[in-house]
Image (cartoon, grey):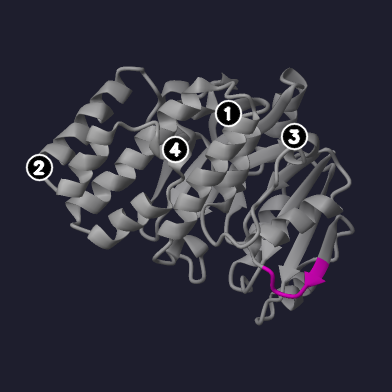
Amino acid sequence: MISVVIPLYNKAHTIERTLGSVLTQTFKEFEVIIVNDGSTDNGVEVIKNFTNDYRVRIINQENQGVSVTRNRGVAEAKYEYIAFLDGDDEWISGYLQSVINVITKFPTAGMICTAGFVYGGDKMCSRIAKKYNNKVTLINFFENPHVFVHTSATVVKKTAFYKTQGFPAGMKNNEDYACFFSIAMISDVVYNGCPLSIYWGNIPGQATSEKNMDSHVINRHNLCYANWVKSGKQNRTFLIFMKYEIRHQILGYLKNKNATALNYLMDNLSNEIKRHFSSFEWLLYKKWCTLSITYIYLTKIIWRTHGYPVVNYK
């Protein structure tokens, strides 16, 4: 009933733990599609030595990047619901059963997001949208997407997935946000506030550890805005969050005196997006004055008055 898609690229050191967390799920009716994206280590051999479970299928391809790899996994999946899991993360044993429970209760949902744990190398804490702690409910995803979604704790309907471009090929970072934001624009989203996944940080080879990803973030802004327009601008909260997120990005540049990054954003952000900000605001940022930082903090305060959820780390 559920297809589990795991992209594999040089994760021989973690894939046994990841796959083991799938094979020990209390819910058993699933398939596992591991797409080996031209790994140069012995990850495939590790898998074959670890299990011969008939539900596990390995597909080999030349290295094409994580977006193409995940898209290939979805294309190969035989079930309607796709559960994504990265090759260095894992699930608590009841994760898939909780997904089935959500599907039963909310059959129209095109995406299911679940809270989880974060392990940073020295301690583990739970990562939950505070407003929805221990709740399972339909949400307005764009209240604060970053507290809701993490790739290894996200399940999508294949029909909803194929109404978007999937994971944009060539993006090394933010490809997951680009895909999931686009799905949330056209379908119902359910959030499960019970932590049932584990994100492992500080793992060698993680894409999120790479630097200089500003271009991918800006590409994601442009792509998602274009998809929002295509959707008929149905979810107005998207626009509120997009402006909040871009201002937060600019705030980091201003505080770090990173003129190169700020200029790059101003030059490459689409004109359609920039029209949603006043000329006065852009002028403030170009002047690099204290007022520009104060202005962004004021917008953050206004954003908080909406009562949008924040992350509750425990």
Which residue is disc 2 drawn over? 290
Which residue is disc 3 drawn over? 160
Residue 281: image quadrant is top left
Secondary structure under badge 3? helix
Which residue is depicted at the point 43% across and 35% down?
A: 242
Identity, as a three-letter code, of the amino acid under mark 2: Thr
Which residue is depicted at the point 38% across and 38% down?
A: 245
Whichever of labels 1 and 3 marks the residue nearer the N terminus, that label is 3
Which residue is disc 1 drawn over? 192
Residue 26 screen position, x and y as percent: 74, 40
Comparing 124 with 128, the one in front is: 128
> CA gap, disc 4 to disc 3?
25 Å
Identify whether 68 is placed above or below 136: below
Which numbered tag is attached to residue 51? Answer: none
Which residue is disc 4 drawn over? 273
Which is in the foreground here, disc 4 or disc 3? 4
Which is in the foreground here, disc 4 or disc 2? 4
> CA gap, disc 4 to disc 2?
24 Å
